[in-house]
Image: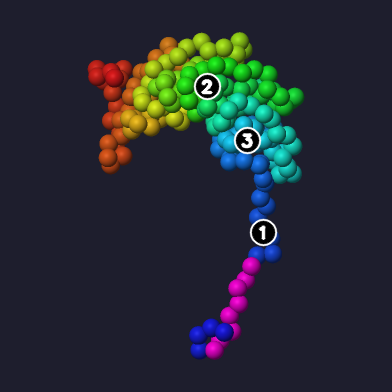
Amino acid sequence: MGRNGESRRTLRSRHQPPTISVGGYSDGLVSGCGALWIAAWNTDTVSRIDPATGAVTDTIGVGQSPFGVACSADAVWVTNTADGTVSRIDPATRTVTDTIGVGRGPFGVACGADAVWVTNTADGTVSRIDPATRTVTDTISVGRNPYGVEFALGSVWVTNLSDGAVSRIDPASRLVTETIDLDAEGVASASGVGSGTAR
């Protein structure tokens, strides 16, 4: 009974939202190559989910402590944070075809400009992988503890966790062309090519 003697009841939805278990601590997630791909940090696996059925169709072993996941036209790329590698998964066979050594503590990964870009958090660098040869062609110094990475607007953008800054990389020259600092109020100020105060 509620206040003043009125009756009360709790309504529960008859349709509970579905939950998909991937059997580990889920981290990176990407949609591409005909499926959803999820990295599970503590089981060293990547799960493939069929978006039509919501079912886990494959669980693929990768390196140690996988975190970031990205899709190119013909592959899924996974950063393995604990062993300093990137796994390449063939989405057709759903197997790891290559394991590529990068820097220490790789976290973020993005595809663009005919390359795969990986942030190495413990090194302060970004690795550029040629997807054709599956080798590291360049190692680019950025800020402290680079974390997130994205390819957009013709550039590679990297968040530097300990600097409060974003590095902009020109994918053609493979150089940092700009560093954008964020002050305490979140206002951006740029330094680098064109400003005369390159960092």
Determine whether label 3 and label 1 are within 8 Å by CB. no
- Label 2 element class: loop
> Residue 176's quadrant in the figure?
top left
Q: Nearer the viewer, residue 118 or 110?
A: 118
Residue at x 41% of width, y 27% of height: 146
Residue 16 disc label: 1
Res 182 quadrant in image: top left
User: Mark 1 or mark 2, which is nearer to you?
Assistant: 2
Q: Position of residue 14 (x, y in %)?
A: 69, 64
Residue 84 badge: 2
Q: Nearer the viewer, mark 3 or mark 1?
A: 3
Residue that appears at 60% across and 26% down = 63
Q: In this rendered view, identify the residue nearer to me: 13 or 170.
A: 13
> How many residues crowd mark 2 within 10 Å: few (<14), some (14–19), many (20+)?
many
Q: Quadrant of the N terminus?
A: bottom right
Which element is circle 3 on?
loop
**Which three-letter amino acid code belongs to the residue tagged 3?**
Thr
Q: Is residue 6 magenta?
A: yes
Image x and y of residue 130, in percent? 56, 13
- Mark 2–mark 3 CB contact (< 8 Å): no
Amino acid residing under circle 2:
Gly
Which secondary structure is most common in the magenta stretch?
A: loop
The residue drawn where x is 47% and y is 21% is 104
